[in-house]
Image (cartoon, rainbow, N blue to C red):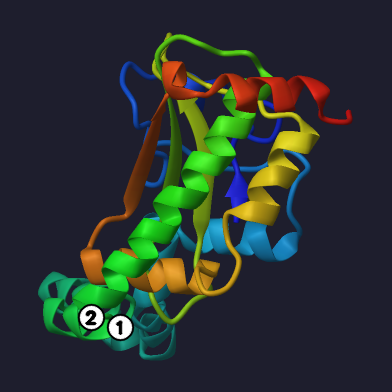
Amino acid sequence: MFIISPDTLRGRAAFEFRQVPRRFLGRVTVWPRAEGDWRLRARLIFEMEFLRYLVALAPFALAALIWRDSALVIAQAPLLMVLVIYGVEMRYLRLLPARRRALMGAAEQDRLGDLLAARAREVLTRIGAGRNLSQGRLHLVIEQSDLVRVPPLTLVSVQWDQGPCILDLDTRERALIRDRLFAPPLTEAAMHRLTLARNETVHALPLDLDAISAHARMAALTAPA
């Protein structure tokens, strides 16, 4: 899981948008400043379609180097190259609709969806109350890659429709998301199965700020720093 905020993500273009939810994958380059280790960076690199295409087509380049006399013939086989890319992208790295539906039954989807909504509400309530926000809506936006056979890639951000903007989360708020969002039975892997089963890569869970209770606001004021 990579928590996105101005303090964790490089690039100003990622924070220029007009409506909530703000999508990232396939729209802007996602690259962390300091958060995460080499595994997160490797997973972000793998998410780049152009690089995956190059890897899929590498056997053609290798064959052209080995059989130089046939290099021109190999280079003039675009249909075969397209079929290879399609096979890798749509048949190997993604699931067909029938396999998506078989991942999770409707009852389990509803159960995990309700749990996700409850946890999102808790996280947003504590963040909104801690910042004493009272206007508009906060959205906990969870975006996941639809690629399978590789570790899940999950981007989490808190977006405010006033502006709109992405909140610059401090270390305590980011720790809150890490501690509360994904825990059994709704782990990051289970969330990925839900994403694939529903064929929804972006989950935007809203909270009306005027619905935050006075008790929650008081608790935020008295919470230890």
Q: Which residue is mark 2?
A: 105
Q: Determine whether, in the image, residue 194 is placed left or right of residue 221.
A: left
Q: Residue at x 48, y 40 (%)?
A: 121
The residue singled out by tag 1 in the image is 92
Q: Percent from the top left, x then y, of residue 152?
A: 50, 68
Q: Is residue 32 visible?
A: yes
Identity, as a three-letter code, of the amino acid under mark 2? Gly
Left or right: where 75 falls relative to 210:
left
Q: Residue at x 45, y 50 (%)?
A: 118
Q: Is residue 143 visible?
A: no
Q: How many marks?
A: 2
Residue reaching furthest to the bottom? 67
User: Whole-percent x and y of residue 157?
Assistant: 53, 37
Point 57% across, 73% down: residue: 184
Q: Nearer the viewer, mark 2 or mark 1?
A: 2
Left or right placement of residue 37 versus residue 185 in this view? right
Quadrant of the image occupied by residue 66? bottom left
Q: From the viewer's side, name the closer residue of 117 and 163.
A: 117
**Residue at the extreme front:** 215
- At 76% from the left edge and 59% from the top edge, which residue is drawn? 37
